Structures are given as C-alpha cells and as structure tokens.
Amino acid sequence: METKNQLRKSMLNIRNTMSEEEVKNKSRTIMNKLTCMDEYKNSKVIFVYMSFKNEVDTTALISKMLEDNKRVVIPYTDTVNTAIIPSEIKNTHEDLTLSHFGYYEPVFEKIRRIEPEELDLIIVPGVAFDRNNNRIGFGKGYYDRILSRKRSDAKAIAVAYDFQVLDEVPSEPHDIKMDMIITEI
C-alpha cells in the first residue's frame, strides 16, 4: 500500500488535471445528492469548507445553505496554532476574504466563533478516502481536531470525486472516520 504522502501526491495530480467543466458537473451532482439527504435537511448549523484547486466545489452549496436559513460555518485557518476556528458567516461578500493560501475564509475581524459541539453537520474535504470511511487530508490534522469535538449525533460527511475513494488507505488511531462519503456516482 502507498504511504499517505504518496497517495496525496498521486490523488492531487489526478484532481489537478480535471477540467473546469468536469469539476462543475461532478460537484453539482454531489451537492444535489447532499442537499436531498435528511442529514442536510435536519441540520441547522452546518460547517463547510471553502473549495479551491479543483476540490468538490462548495460555492453553490453555501449560497443554498444561506437561502435555506441554515447557519453557515466556515473554517478560519489559524496557522500559528495549527487549528481551525469555525466562524459563522451571514454574507459571502462581506464576511469572507481571500487567504494567502488562495481560498476564501472569514475576515479575521468578523469572526463569529462557533464551538464544534454546536455543529449539526460537518462537510469535510479530503485528498483520498476508502470504503471504510477513512480519510486522508493534507496531513496537518486540522479536521481531525474539529471532528474529535463534534457531538455524537452530529454527522461528518465527506464529499469527494469517485476516483478519490479507494479500497483502502493508510489510517492511524488519531484519524477520525467519516460517517459517510458522497461522490458523483
């Protein structure tokens, strides 16, 4: 089996070759599946990542969540403490700014901190997954720390392209499994 770093590299290479149209179409299918689920419909406070670099696109989902009167929580990346600060946003134009990593995140001065225990649903990105709901992210543990504090009834749902879901990926005791993985297939 490939190491986590080898898998990250090969998966990111594949993902980075996807066309804009392919990302758009597959992301739309994934998000339509997600928003039809009871886990989405019954959630009031939803944590969702801001997509970048051919990740499953969450832009339309965030707009829909605001239209559906969901409380939308976006990660602010605290690189000093290697932590995510979940922050509620009310308006994508006023509450977000482009980070030096190249994705949007809450404006630091406007952070409305939400504790992980308040979240009903956590929509998780990743680089690779397996059929046992294991996840490989970027290797810093940002999401594992948030997921370790979620309520037992809150769901962690990964969104990924079908090619990102393998039979098995390496996992360690501190890695938090997903409750489910949604792909375009």
Image (cartoon, helix red, strand yellow):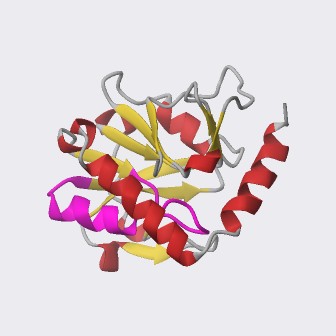
List the single residue furthest toward the front.
185
Q: Residue at x 37, y 48 (%)?
A: 47
Where is residue 162 shown, x and y percent of the image?
56, 48
Where is residue 125 shown, x and y percent of the image?
53, 50
Q: Residue at x 60, y 75 (%)?
A: 19
| Position of the N terminus by quadrant | top right
Quick check: 77 above or below 121?
below
List the single residue furthest toward the bottom.
93
Where is residue 142 shown, x and y percent of the image?
59, 44
Q: Residue at x 59, y 67 (%)?
A: 54
Q: Residue at x 39, y 38 (%)?
A: 116
Residue 64 on the magenta span: yes
Residue 108 on the magenta span: no
- Front residue of 58 and 103: 58
Q: Is residue 183 left or right of residue 168?
A: left
- The picture quadrant where one finds residue 29 is bottom left
Where is residue 74 shown, x and y percent of the image?
40, 57
Q: Is residue 131 left or right of residue 56?
A: right
- Front residue of 106 and 176: 176
Q: Is residue 8 visible?
A: yes
Q: Is residue 158 left or right of residue 117?
A: right
Q: Is residue 163 left or right of residue 58?
A: right
Q: Magenta segment range? A: 48-71
